[in-house]
Amino acid sequence: MTERHVIAVLVDNEPGVLARVIGLFSGRGYNIESLTVSEVDAEAGLSRINVVTIGTPMIIEQIKNQLDRLVPVHSVRDLSEEGPHVETELALVKVAGQGDKRVEALRIADIFGAKVDDTTLESFIFRLDGQSDKVDRFIDLMKPLGLIEVARTGAVAISRGTEGI
Amino acid sequence: MSQEMTGSEIVLRALADQGVDTVFGYPGGAVLPIYDALHVQNSIRHILVRQEGGAVHAAEGYARSSGKVGVVLVTSGPGATNAVTGLTDALMDSVPVVCLTGQVPTHLIGNDAFQEADTTGITRPCTKHNYLVKDIADLARVVHEAFYVARSGRPGPVVVDLPKDILQGKGSYTPPSVNGHRSYRPRKKGDIGQIEKAAAAMAQAERPLFYCGGGVINAGPKAAHLLTELVKLTGFPCTLTLMGLGALPASNKQFLGMVGMHGTYESNLAMHHCDLMINIGARFDDRVTGKLDEFAPHSTKIHVDIDPSSINKNVRADIPIVGDAAHVLEDLTKVWKARQYRADRKKLDAWWAQIDEWRGRDCLKYQASDTLIKPQYALERLRELTKGRDDVFITTEVGQHQMWAAQFLPFEKPNHWMTSGGLGTMGYGLPAAMGVQVAHPDALVIDVAGEASVLMNIQEMSTVAQYRLPVKIFILNNEYMGMVRQWQELLHGGRYSESYMDSLPDFVKLAESFGAVGLRAEKPADVDGVIEEMIAVDKAVIADILVDKAENCFPMIPSGAAHHKMLLGPDDQAAEPISEEGMVLV
């Protein structure tokens, strides 16, 4: 019944706008799987919030309508519903180990196309981007190899083709 | 380059340019600069309440009875937090209010300064929008925007938090812009294709029903007029929500009475059995729908609402229309006429015959008494003794008396009925009545109250006295939190835990101590005299009507039940025990 949706929200970059969005989700009991926010147009003072949420179709519709009626919100787009889009997230993954485990970690990182951003004699920091499930799989594989810490951005997404938000 | 003014002067100038003539407020340290500026001008009247909560309800009463934006002015910290209940009330009932709150100076924000509270943080979920002004260059624009946001689309409360240094600083004034707001532009006109579909569905319906709410009231008197016309044109029956009373004259023969938990039998059964529901400006509230999965199971649903988030929230709409009730009603009527639609007379007659049979149950009847004043009797007498007047405004507190007022008083016009629907705020009625009386100085403003509710804001009697507001407080005094007692009787084995109102004041002496008139009715024979005197005196009155303490409010849909499981009276009570799912509902 529940579906995962990636929603892009264009908002005025003003104080409290993120609190409004987060408060809406917590106050009405909606799920946030991930959420990213950053200014995307400094001149126009616009920020973009990318939120990944899970709910029944009725709840997803509510979420979009509730977001849309917030005063500083310019546009709400459901990328999952609207069609093909590119979705990616960035993760930094710290793995510590020696010997075979260290070699195996590096080998798997290579297979996944992860970059080594930093290394010591006993640890790596891998940088990986891609779809969230790819990041999940990478992290799972690192667990027996000495996974220490993960930092993830959450998904950002943009629709394909010539149209903008 | 316009002239330099202080922040306080900019605020007052902006209020004046927004057409504000009245502000309800209470001073304090952070807003002293505004009070200083108020002192040297004559265009805005300030009504000094006795607690900030009263100011917001007064502004609500003012707004709902006049169609204008209500304005509140309170100080920082406790001033703002006391306003929170009123703001939430205004949000739930879609009342346009602008609340100006003082704030500690910008350099102290976040320092736990004296009378500091995170006002924008606290009020974010209970306002339509809020602002903290940190630069005097934004001040005029923000105040204008606040009014635009409060009254546009689905109306609601807006807070503008004003640090003291901004109020004392110097800046320039900018007049209201025509653009309103750069991102917030709610849709007014409904989609014509959807309206065509709705009209076609109406023409084919066999058991149609209009179900209309506060959205029709908020769309202005024109919307109520258009609704009345369309109801007549189609011949369809119409029910109204608590918030919608007055949208169709109560005397209209096609009006079935209020719908919902304490609505009429005929309304609720018509809701259950209709094959087409035309919802205009109502939001399928849980007080109306009862058990959702058994709600109006055979009906196609048209839902007109200005707020897209109200559509498909609780009940899926088959024909959703986003737009202002007045615009949609106008277009719907045009389409109905242009296509020369008319209802199938035979089928509609059969539907009306069924409705008349339900009406025959006379669901509002009660057991009359010669010795005890029945609350319903008191309201019937109030109805009779105010008959023919078109200047009667009713406010209420919250509880049994509120439901009886909704059932027994006749609302012929919009904006004459002010009650706390969504939030159910006890203590609403007295301050709201003050606001109504300020907006309509010569009208007969009656707060139908319970003795428990009215005590929640009884301090406002002092405001009533100061401004010589001749409001009438009509207390149906049963010495109980009546609705709490009723639920304890029906759901909790008659264990009346903490619902008895011990140590009540002598309301007659209480009235007199505030310079008002106190009256009391102890038996049915007293009622007419008390009401007549209450209306006749040109002063505030508290009429203490000592009613039957055991009376319950019927009809009633027990919580968790569907419409057709309605209880009609005390004899119905034991028919079916209330389900466990029902017990957890409010």
Image (spheres, rainbow, N blue to C red):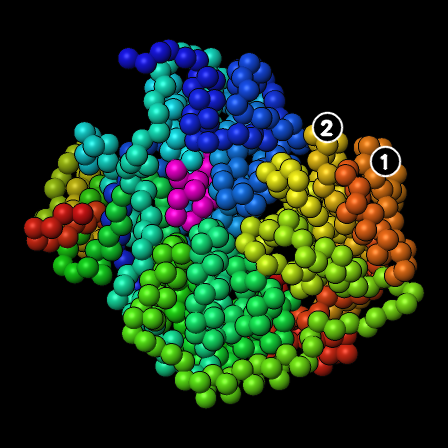
Foreground residue, B564 or B521?
B521
| Residue B151 lies within the magenta run | yes
Q: N-terminal of the two: label 2 or label 1? A: 2
Percent coordinates x, y for residue B447 in the rendering: 70, 48
> In the figure, is residue B362 to the left or right of A34?
right
Foreground residue, B318 or B177?
B177
> In the figure, is residue B159 to the left or right of A114?
right
Query: Which chain letter goes with mark 2?
Result: B
Residue drawn at x 17%, y 42% is: A127
| Residue B205 lies within the magenta run | no
> In the figure, is residue B521 to the left or right of B159?
right
Quadrant assignment, res B352 = bottom right
Residue drawn at x 47%, y 69% is: B231
Residue drawn at x 55%, y 20% is: B42
Q: Is residue B152 above or below residue B100?
A: below
Q: Quadrant of the N terminus of chain B?
A: top left
**Residue corresponding to mark 1:** B512
Percent coordinates x, y for residue B380 in the rendering: 75, 62
Residue at mark 2 shares a chain with residue at mark 1: yes
Q: Secondary structure at mark 2?
A: helix
Percent coordinates x, y for residue A32 in the rendering: 35, 51
Q: Is residue B226 above or below residue B539?
A: below
> In the figure, is residue B233 to the left or right of B271?
left
Q: Quadrant of the C terminus of chain B?
A: bottom right
**Residue corresponding to mark 2:** B466
Foreground residue, B439 or B300?
B439
Q: Secondary structure at mark 1?
A: helix
**Can residue A102 be seen by looking at this rendering?**
no
* Residue range corresponding to the magenta coloring: B148-159
Amino acid type indicated by mark 2:
Gln
Residue drawn at x 38%, y 76% is: B202
Percent coordinates x, y for residue B359 in the rendering: 63, 79
